[in-house]
Amino acid sequence: ANVNRWRGQIGLAPVTEPDLPGLLETTIVDGVEVTIVDMESADGSRLLGAIVPPGDGKTWFAKAVDQPLAIEAIRPSFIEFARSIHLDSTHTHAEHNHPVSAPGGPVAGASVDERLAGWSLPMNWKHEESASPILSASYLADNDSGGARITVTRLNAGAGGDLANINRWRGQMGLAPVESLDASAGVINRDPITVDLGTPDGGSRMVAAIVPAGPSTYYFKMTGSADGAGAEMDGFNRLVREVGLGAAVK
């Protein structure tokens, strides 16, 4: 059903179940089945999609649509990203039930996961109870401007590449892709790489930071209305600074 929905989006006719195996590229990565579909229409549109059920009872979908050469350029990083999606097996059930923050906040020298478990939330933030366990953390911030959602995701180091990930985020905000990581891409910080993106109508905002940590990369992302996300910048920056970078708690 999803493949035929994607085919319809680029003007292709639906296919029957017996035809599907020839259209799909399926691999098993760390016990997770990753299915890639790559389709091109007669008018020159190409769609690259990924279907990943990581084991949390949900199915994750990723999709890129562009001209054939543009899709070919991102195909390796797109597939690498799809194959990096997995549940964090090091998280126990108790951890997903939101451990109580340790007095004094994160411990110096601890790992990102340990700092995250001990981080003291801003007063108006709360854990998102319905969040997928594929996320290391998910928070909802309540404010008078519409609030914001803040997530932390851990993937294999370099999953997709920084430029590919930022262009994916730009696409989510209705922005055109860029070729370099500079101010025109929305980059506002280099250490860690942080982007601040707004939709063309100015109504929505996304701020995201990319923090490498050994064999993993952590993605800190905040989305919401422009004003709602803006009101949580101090808390978001503190999260990145104290948890992602391990800076001393102020």
Image: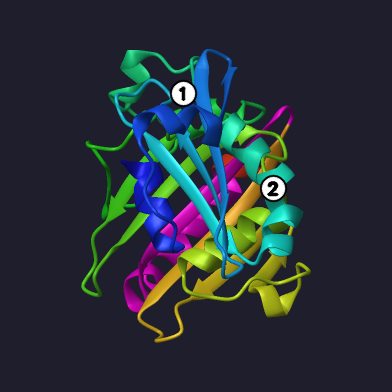
Position of residue 20 relative to residue 201, above or below, is above
Disc on res. 87: 1
Q: Which residues are magenta?
A: 214-242
98 left or right of 221 in image: left
Please, what is the three-letter code of the amino acid marked with disc 2? Arg
Seen in the picture, residue 244 relative to 116 is either above or below; the reply is below
Asked if the stretch drawn in magenta spans residue 241, the answer is: yes
- The foreground one among 115 and 135 is 135
Badge nearest the viewer, 1 or 2: 2
Q: Residue at x 30, y 37 (%)?
A: 131
* Percent x, y of residue 176: 59, 75
Specify the quadrant that holds the N terminus: top left
On screen, residue 191 versus residue 90, left or right, reads: right
Going 41% across and 38% down the picture, which residue do you hit? 60
Q: For mark 1, give the secondary structure.
A: loop
Residue 19 or 215: which is nearer the viewer?
19
Viewer-nearest residue: 207 or 35:
35
Q: Give the mark, 1 or 2, whose residue is nearer the N terminus.
A: 2
Identify the residue shown where x is 22% and y is 36%.
Answer: 129
Q: Is residue 40 above or below residue 103?
A: below
Callout 2: helix, strand or loop? helix
Instruction: Check disc 1 and give the amino acid type.
Output: Leu
- The residues bearing labels 1 and 2 have C-alpha atoms spaced at a distance of 23 Å
Give the residue pinned by disc 2.
75
| Residue 66 in view (yes/no) | yes
